[in-house]
Amino acid sequence: MRRTSFLKIIAALACAGLLPSVHAQGAVDKQLSSQPFTIVAPFPPGGPVDTLSRILATGLAERYKQPAVVDNRAGASGNIGIDLVKRAAPTGHTLLVVPAGNLTINPTLMPKLGYSVEADFATVASLAKAPNVLAVNPSVPARTVAELVALSRAKPDSISYASPGVGSGLHLAGELFKQQSGADILHVAYKGSAPGLNDVLGGTVPMILGNLPALLPHIQSGKLRPLAVTDPTRASALPDVPTLAEAGVPGVAVTSWYGVVAPRQTPAPVLAQLARDITQIFNAPATKAQLEKQGLYVWITTGPAFGELIRKEAATWAPIIKSRKIEPQ
């Protein structure tokens, strides 16, 4: 193609709004370069939300030559940090990194939540996902999911499972497993993942449904025995562990994921640029390798598609919450 013809096509696409103009792109870059960034992580340091927030902060700081800090605003099941971002100026400089449950479960579980995902936030992108693992203390005689289900039926109320709280994604995954497998298991709710995991490691509670990043070190050391993963596909970190579907329990494809949202009125061009930045930051080979060592896998969905993902997952959890009469405690 001749150079003049190519330039005419590019110009026509720009006039039709199919390509961003150099001027518009320059304005977005200038705006995002104008002040520091705050990445709000509404949970304590040390977990996946904190890890992903720090990667995002580092990437934005390098891209825009501005400071980018992570603000760990823990409390009220993440609602303190969420409210902070809800009220922030919609410039693209204050972003929220959250797990799926805050966007897909809590709006149904907590009618008086204080925020609406659609009314108060603009979707930017998902970041990563982490398979969930069904694991037991090695003292439990079951070595397969089928053996666990049979054991729970033979000895009712003998098998309980730990979760990080009533209405958490892992609690609902347990209820879905119970429904689909017919297992006779009891739910034991904790205030967070760590205390529940400690009790399973100590043998007080025999079973746990947990995120792979939290359970992986204990699986590798032999302190936990993995029976299945709840992801639709096997985890590369646990290639010999079957999915629940492979283990004979279909319909429990539950994956923990994490994403970024911004205040609702953030301009569309800014959201689009942030989505492109996130895609570049998290798809860097070194970043992907770093996260995979922790059991996290880069998983990018941006803009309206990310919003649709949230809506579909919320619609999946709502009937389970209502039918099982799950209420916050």
Image (spheres, helix red, strand yellow):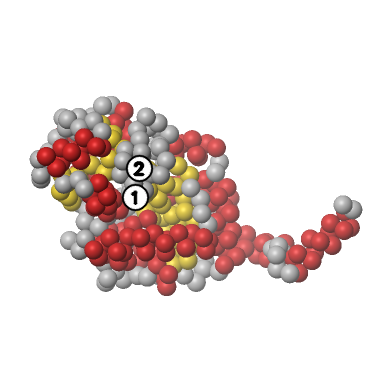
Query: Residue at the spot x=51%, y=50% of the render?
Result: 300
Query: Residue at the spot x=40%, y=37% of the render?
Result: 234
**Is the residue 220 above or below the residue 154 in the image?**
above
Q: Are marks 1 and 2 in contact (CB under 8 Å)?
A: yes
**Is the residue 27 above or below the residue 99 in the image?**
below
SS category of the residue bearing label 2? loop
Residue 38 visible (yes or no): no
The three-letter amino acid code for the residue at tag 1 is Gly
SS category of the residue bearing label 1? loop
Q: Where's the C terminus, which quadrant?
A: bottom left
Task: In the rendered structure, find residue 245 and report the number of the disc placed on it.
Answer: 2
Q: Position of residue 51 (x, y in %)?
A: 40, 45
- Mark 1 neighbour density, 10 Å: few (under 14) some (14–19) many (20 or more): some
- Which residue is the site of mark 1? 251
Q: Is residue 174 left or right of residue 46?
A: left
Query: Residue at the spot x=20%, y=63% of the render?
Result: 325
Q: Position of residue 123 (x, y in %)?
A: 48, 62
292 or 44, nearer to the observer? 292
- Mark 2 neighbour density, 10 Å: few (under 14) some (14–19) many (20 or more): some
Looking at the rendered structure, the number of numbered marks drawn on it comes to 2
Task: In the rendered structure, find residue 65 and report the number of the disc placed on it.
Answer: none
Q: Position of residue 216 (x, y in %)?
A: 32, 34
Q: How far separated are the C-alphas under marks 1 and 2?
A: 7 Å
Query: Residue at the spot x=36%, y=38% of the render?
Result: 246
The three-letter amino acid code for the residue at tag 2 is Ala
List the single residue furthest toward the top: 221
Along the polypeptide, which appears first: circle 1 or circle 2?
A: 2
Residue 166 visible (yes or no): yes
Q: Position of residue 137 (x, y in %)?
A: 19, 33
